[in-house]
Image (cartoon, rainbow, N blue to C red):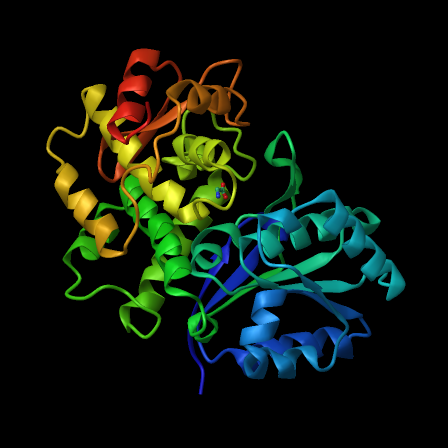
Amino acid sequence: MSEHQQLEVELGDRSYPITIGRNLRMSLCESRDRFITEGRKVVALVDQGLAETNTSQINEFLSEIPYLEIPSGERSKSVEWLSNGWDFLASHKIDRTGVLFVLGGGVSGDLAGFLAASYLRGIEFVQVPTTLLAMVDSSVGGKTGINLSAGKNLVGAFHQPSKVFIDLDLLATLPGREFSAGMAEVIKYGMLGNILLYKKLSELPENLSYQNQELSSIIYHCCLDKASIVRDDERESDSTGGRALLNLGHTFAHAIEAVAGYGQYLHGEAVAIGLVCAFRLSQKLGFCGNDSESQLLTLLKEYNLPTDLKNPLPVEDLLDSMRSDKKVHKGCLRFIIMKEIGRSFIEESVDLKYIKEVLKSIGAR
Ligand code: GLY
C-alpha cells in the first residue's frame, strides 16, 4: 500500500501537486493511464543508469509507452541530446496534447523540461525524480535547460511540470555518494531559511538513509520551503532575496565544478564546500557570530561530504569562473549571506579580499 503526503506549488493556473511517499508505482501508472484514457499520447525520457538498475520498479510504467534513454551525466544536458529528444517526440507524432514523463536525476529533469518547453512551443511534462538531489531541488520549480561549453545552464526556460511524483523506493539503488550529494542540498535548506530543519539534521541520532523513517518528512519540508519560495518569486526576479536564496553556496560551488573539471565533484559535493565558504564569508562580514562552524563541518562530514578542496585550485581561476556565472547581476558578484544560520539575504558588493581569503581557507592557492 502506498502512504504519501501531498503539497501544492501554487502558481495560479500553473499550480501543481507534489506527491511524496513510498511505493507510488501504482499512482504513477494510474496517472499515465488517465492521460491515455483522455486520448493523449504519453512518452518518457529515462536516465539510462536507472533503466539498467531499477528495471522491476519502472518496467511496469514503461511497458505501455515509448521512451528514450539518456546517458547518465552532465554531458547529456547538450544540444545534441536536446535534438535527439525533439526527433524522438516528432517520430512518435506527439502533438500539443502529448505528455512527457521524465524519470531520472537533475540532468534528465532539466533536459526533459527544456524539451517539453521548446517542442511545439510547450507540452506538458511530469517529473519523477530518482535522486535525492532532484527530489528536494531540481524537480520542483520549473527551471529547465542545457549546458553550453561556455557554462552550465546557459540555455533554458522556466517551464513548470504538471505533477511531481517523489517515490522514495526509487532511492533504493541510488549510490551512497549520490545520496550524500543530495544531503548537501537538504542541509542548504536549513541554512538558508529553516533553522528547525538544520537543528533536526544536526540532532538526528543516526544519519539519514533511504530506509530512515524521517526521510519522507524531511523531503516534504524541503519541498514545502521550495514551493513557497517559487510561489513568491517564480522567475528569480526579486533582487532582495526570493528564489536567488536557493543559490546559497552555489556561486562557490559552480566555480569549483568548472575549474576542477566537470565530473571531479558531484554537484552536491561542490555545494557542500560552497556552504562552508558561504558560512565563512558571512562571518567575515560580521554575521553568524553565534553559530558554530564545527557543527556545520561535523554535519557535512557525517554524510562524507567534502568541506575543502580535494586538490588545490588557483584562486584567480575560481574568481574568473565566478565572474562568468549567470548569477552575476549588473556586473557585480552577488553572494547569498546568512545573518545567522536559517536567515539569509543577498549581498551585492562583497570586498574581493574576503572572497580570496575564503577560497584560500578551503585550500585554493
Ligand atoms: N535550484 C535553484 C532553483 O531552483 O532556483
Observer-nearest of 292 and 31: 292
Is residue 17 rendered to the left or right of residue 122? left
Is residue 187 rendered to the left or right of residue 203? right
- Name the image quarter holding the C terminus: top left
Residue at x 63%, y 48% (from the top left corner)? 75
- Name the image quarter holding the N terminus: bottom left
Place of residue 243 in the rendered image (x, y in percent of width and height, measured from the top left): 46, 37
Residue at x 20%, y 56% (from the top left corner)? 200
Place of residue 146 in the rendered image (x, y in percent of width and height, measured from the top left): 65, 42
Considering every residue shown, the one lying at the far left of the view is 290
Residue at x 10%, y 33% (from the top left corner)? 290
Observer-nearest of 225 and 172: 172
Considering every residue shown, the one lying at the far front of the view is 311
Residue at x 54%, y 53% (from the top left corner)? 106
Image quarter for residue 222? bottom left
Image quarter for residue 143? top right
Q: Is residue 33 above or below residue 347?
A: below
Is residue 351 rendered to the left or right of residue 339? right
Is residue 193 rendered to the left or right of residue 322? left
Place of residue 186 in the rendered image (x, y in percent of width and height, measured from the top left): 34, 52
Asked if residue 351 can be seen in this view, the reply is no
Q: How many numbered badges does the structure rendering display?
A: 0
Q: Is residue 126 above or below residue 152?
A: below
Place of residue 148 in the rendered image (x, y in percent of width and height, measured from the top left): 66, 35
Asked if residue 244 can be seen in this view, the reply is yes
